[in-house]
Image (cartoon, rainbow, N blue to C red):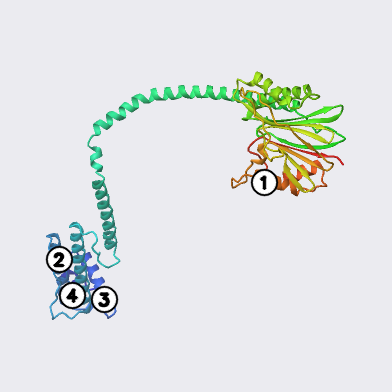
Amino acid sequence: MINKKIIQEISVKAGLAKETTEMVIREYLKNINSPSEGNENIRGEDIVSALTIVINSATEIIEQILQGENPGPVKIPESVTEDFLFDFTENINNGIILYKNITDYIEKLASGNLDTNPPQGKTKILWAMKKLQEELKQLVKTAEYMAAENISGHFNNINSLSAAFHFIATHLDKSFDKINSQKRELEKANEALIRANTMEARDMDMAVTVQRSLMPDSPPRSSKWEIAYFFKPMAGVSGDFYDFYMDNDELSGVSLFDVSGHGISSALISMIAKWIIYQSFHKFFNKSFSNVPLEISRELNSAIGKSDYYLTGVIIKFEDDLIRYINASHPDIYIKKNDTVFPLRKSTGELPAGMLFGMNIEPVVYDEISYNIEPGDFILLYTDGFSECCNLTGADYGAVKLQKSFSESPSTATAQETLNFLMDNIYKFMGKETFDDDCTVIVIKKHH
């Protein structure tokens, strides 16, 4: 136990409560090398002297800090020999050094030097100072940005902004009413468009049905000729049309035509033209074949001359082993004899003369070409949707590749096999199975 007399003396000398004095004495006795038991005999004068120095120094340091001064280090008399007092004094002096460093650090921050290095240490106050420095930096950056962007200038006319917002708010209802009204009109227009599309689709289906019903749905049977054909409209109905003419159950002729344009209007022209060509062919079948295109031209001018549509095409008349051929500005037809393929032209190598039909073109005389077909020979007719198709790089197939493909087809093949050979080659070239135009191909072979 600590001597109560010593506690009383220290309490009076230091001006402290007895409980506080006893607590201080017990704390510092722990720092003495000798065990705390038996320290009752420690000299009270020495403890009073030591604690008085400590208390007076601490009081002086606090007063200096409160007055804004930098406290000096605590100095103890040379006569003091207690180790615990030296250790305590060293701790106080280290605290003074830390206080000075923190004070200098705060003064630098206050002067605007936000990049100054904070004092080293791991105390809570140093950690708080570092956080403060980061917050100050962010605050300064924000202020600089606001100054650079003249943010404050945007708030100089708050009254005008308020008035503008009020104006907008008062007109929003009217705008919404107008928008709703326009929305209702759009809904009505959309419903009308849906109805129109439905009707158009129905009309297209009807047009497809009518056109297909007027076209041969299979090649005619003939004892002298094999016939195969491919017909592919680009969009439902087609501007291409073909026909086979029979006389006493034998093939007497074939035609292939291409109406300009696409869609229903071209399909309607094709239906009109197909009937006119059929009538003209049979009307002059037993007469001069050169009269057929003249009759077609006159009839078409009367029926569709006021429109902007025109036709190109070819007509072939069969007379036993002889064929008679007329070309109205259409791609060549090709003859295949064994492995040799050539366009059927005039003896001079020139294209047969023949204007296209329609558009109020005055009837002219068309060149008629005759050619003797032998057993095993092939005839190839096609529209430009076949020869002018493109591959994925945009390159045209062209008449040269078509002629080469026709020549490479087996000469012993049937008409259908030859057509299949041509279609396989064209699909390989295109890299797809859709054409960019109406496409029709007809292959005819003379029986052996």
Report crowding for label 2: few under 14, some 14 to 19, many 20 or more residues within 10 A (C-alpha): many
Quarter occupied by the N terminus: bottom left
* Point 24% across, 38% down: residue: 155
> Which of marks 1 and 4 precedes in the sequence?
4
Position of residue 422 in the picture relative to residue 95 (left or right): right
> Which of marks 1 and 2 precedes in the sequence?
2
Query: Do tag 3 and tag 4 residues touch (Cβ < 8 Å)?
Result: no
Question: Which dot, 1 or 3, sits closer to the camera?
Answer: 1
> Which of marks 4 and 3 precedes in the sequence?
3
Q: Looking at the picture, how far across and down is residue 30, in whole percent?
A: 27, 74
* Above-or-below relation of 94 to 343: below
The Cα–Cα distance between marks 4 and 1, rounded to whole angstroms, is: 123 Å
Q: Which label belongs to residue 31? A: 3
Position of residue 277 in the picture relative to residue 97 (left or right): right
Q: Which label belongs to residue 426? A: none
Question: Which dot, 4 or 2, sits closer to the camera?
Answer: 2
Question: Which dot, 3 or 2, sits closer to the camera?
Answer: 2
> Which of marks 3 and 1 precedes in the sequence?
3
Question: Which dot, 4 or 1, sits closer to the camera?
Answer: 1
Q: Looking at the picture, how far across and down is residue 79, in whole percent?
A: 13, 81
The Cα–Cα distance between marks 1 and 3, rounded to whole angstroms, is: 113 Å
Q: Looking at the picture, how far across and down is residue 207, in whole percent?
A: 69, 25
Residue 256, quarter of the rendered image? top right
Return the residue nearer the eye: 181 or 276: 276
Residue corresponding to mark 4: 47
The three-letter amino acid code for the residue at tag 3 is Asn
Query: Do tag 3 and tag 2 residues touch (Cβ < 8 Å)?
Result: no
Residue corresponding to mark 1: 400
Query: Do tag 1 and tag 3 residues touch (Cβ < 8 Å)?
Result: no
Residue 437, quarter of the rendered image? top right
Residue corresponding to mark 2: 61
* Above-or-below relation of 18 to 310: below
